[in-house]
Image (cartoon, helix red, strand yellow):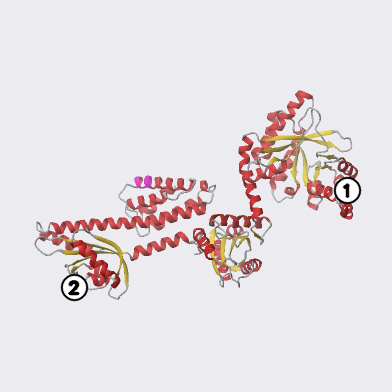
Amino acid sequence: MLARKWAYQVSTTTYIPLPYQDIEAELLALVDRLFDAVHSEPFCPEPAADVARRLVDLNCVGPTTFRKTVDSLGKALLGQPEMQSVARLPGKVVMLLGTLSASYAEAVRLYTLRQQDDMNRTLITLGRDWRLALRATEARLDAVLANTPFGVGIADLDGRFVDTNPALTDILGYSPTEFTERTLFDIVPASDEPFLRDACDGLLEVFLPRLRQRRRLLNKAGDEVPATLTVTVLHAPDRSDRFLLIVQDDSELNLLQRQLTLQSLHDVVTGLPNRQFFTTRLETTLHRADRAAGATVYHLGLDAFSMVADGFGRQVGDHLLKVVAERLKSVVAKEKAVVARLDGDEFGILVENSPTTPDIASMVDAINERLAEPVYLDGTGISVSTSIGVVHRPKKDVDPTELLRASDLALRRAKSRGRRQWELFDARQDADDRADFQLATTMPSAWELGEVRLAYRPLVELRGGRAIGVEAGLRWDHPRFGVLGHRRCVELAEQTGLMLSLGDWMLHSACAQVLRWRSESGFDLPLVLALSEGQVVDPDLVGRVLGILDAAGIEPAELRLGMPAHLLDGTRPEPVENLKVLAEAGVDVVLHGFGGAAGDLTCLADLPVRAVRISERLTSDRAHRATDPGQTSQVALLDRALTDLVALVHLAGGMVVVDGVHTRALADWWRHAGADNALGEHFPMPDGTPGQH
């Protein structure tokens, strides 16, 4: 579809000497090369240069052809669904289009030079054969000189013009009569005259076949004109030799190159520098910044910008981006700073600090106060806030790409704390985040290699001490970081979307283990499993769970699933619907992370839930405080609160499960507080079963 659209656009803006089907096939091959280049790792934009040269070979050189080409390709590369998973997509697309633009300009220039060379050969051939067909040659030469867009002049060996064509008159502004009063040395700056005279001597002595260089020529008004100058000698056997001068006006070409450079380094919507420009400026600024003051990078992400774009439309969103760009520039107008649009609703500010530069907190406040002013569109006021990641005084030799990665991570941490927050980059936190990312991305392969396995622990009745269920959890025997428990494994798996597949495997493997225990030792207890947040909101959760149970031959009543209580507040419909359908099918559902808030108690009263698991934060906090003699009063208050919480759950008709019971003293305290069931290191698995996790 992209190739067909592209073919239609170029066919309507220039002439391509091919059938339409062939044009479409040619452009389809170019599209494939560009898409492959974006997907390539390591990334290399060089295929775009081949695409540009092929476009020129196909004669796609119309005045609007390339603009439509960049427009079509830019939108497709950024918007195509298959491209959304590509890392650093906007940066890659910018580099690809930049390479395409630069190579296209160079190919057009070479194309023009080839035309010029063809013209030179034609003129030289005409001069060489003039004795055989003088009249015909002169007629053809006159026609060529009159119609060619290149300025052509003929000068004697002293450099004085003896003939010129209309194009040269248009380029330099002299009339044909005025040209006869001048030499070719008069149309170059005085500083270039010695060079041109030496070159002409070389042409006459035949050791220099021709001169072709980009030079600046002087027009009648004394202004410099960028041009490609070609000088050669016309040898004539029966008359004096002549210099043939060909001038190509490069003004439009230079303008096109500047425009393409501007487009490749600036954002189309806001006119701000883009990520590529910003990255380049980072490197130069860090090296020249004052050693003591340094520089500061602010990475901004507009809060809820998608709500504006989705609610009011793309045009309003673009207008808001323009306003934000102007306001950000006004905030740092007195500073030596660069404001750029990095991607979508993200902006970057690079400040080269000075003694008068505001501190970070003041700068952040100034940014948010300026952005908080409403933007009125059709009588409706719209305002935005921003979350900001800050990297203060980075090292001079830091890689710009690494610096932007650090500012982006700081921005993500700021966003995780809510709107209109800012976060200063912390190297120690960054190292921890990197370790997390490495663990999360290597977890799938560790699972395939068998490093991630299931471990089991009993669910025990506190009053009787007997096991009433067995909970399955994840355990990762990592070769470097040691044993990672269930909660840590779930956190890592959720980051990469692995948890859905891992959850299915957990339930399937745990069911198989329960069946083995039944057949081998008669151990027959319900299976307990905690669902992650990603599993609970999965619309296919019910089908997954019941399908696995049916395949294993285990009844739904033999399964007890834990669901996070905070997801059942009605904000999203999937968790509540999943809970109700599973309960109707016979599965016992337990609310995990129960803290006694009004919403938690409402869920317990309104939903078909038999039990709650007290938030591990509360149980661990109580255990920690109990060991500190200085917190006796706080422990008493907490004990009263936990005891009342247990009573409230019982009053609502539910049972209470406590996790983290690792000692007999804790077990006795929770039994006295009225809790029903518990899990923890204090309770061993029954004989004949695997150990705890």
- Of the residues shown, which amino acid type is indicated by label 2? Thr
Left/right placement of residue 672 relative to residue 70 reads right
Name the spot of residue 102 as percent of width and height, x first: 40, 57
**Residue found at the far right of this picture:** 672
Q: How far apart are the two marked residues, 2 and 1, measured between alpha carbons?
A: 110 Å
**Which region shows up in magenta?**
22-26
The quarter in which the C terminus is drawn is: top right
State yes or no: discs 2 and 1 in contact (Cβ < 8 Å). no
Residue type at mark 1 is Thr
In the image, residue 56 sits, relative to residue 175, either above or below, namely above
Residue 643: mark:
1
Residue at the image point whose x is 87% and y is 55% from the top: 630
Within 10 Å of the Cα at label 1, are there few (<14), some (14-19), or many (20+) other Cα atoms?
some
Question: Residue tagged by mark 2?
Answer: 180
Residue 567 shown left or right of residue 249 in the figure: right
> Counting other residues with Cα less than 10 Å from the Cα at mark 2, is it few (<14), some (14-19), or many (20 or more)?
some
Q: Give 179 or 575, whichever is nearer the viewer.
A: 179
User: Residue 339: image x %, image y %?
Assistant: 54, 65
- Whether 130 is drawn above or below 161: the answer is above
Residue 14 place in picture, x, y as percent: 33, 55
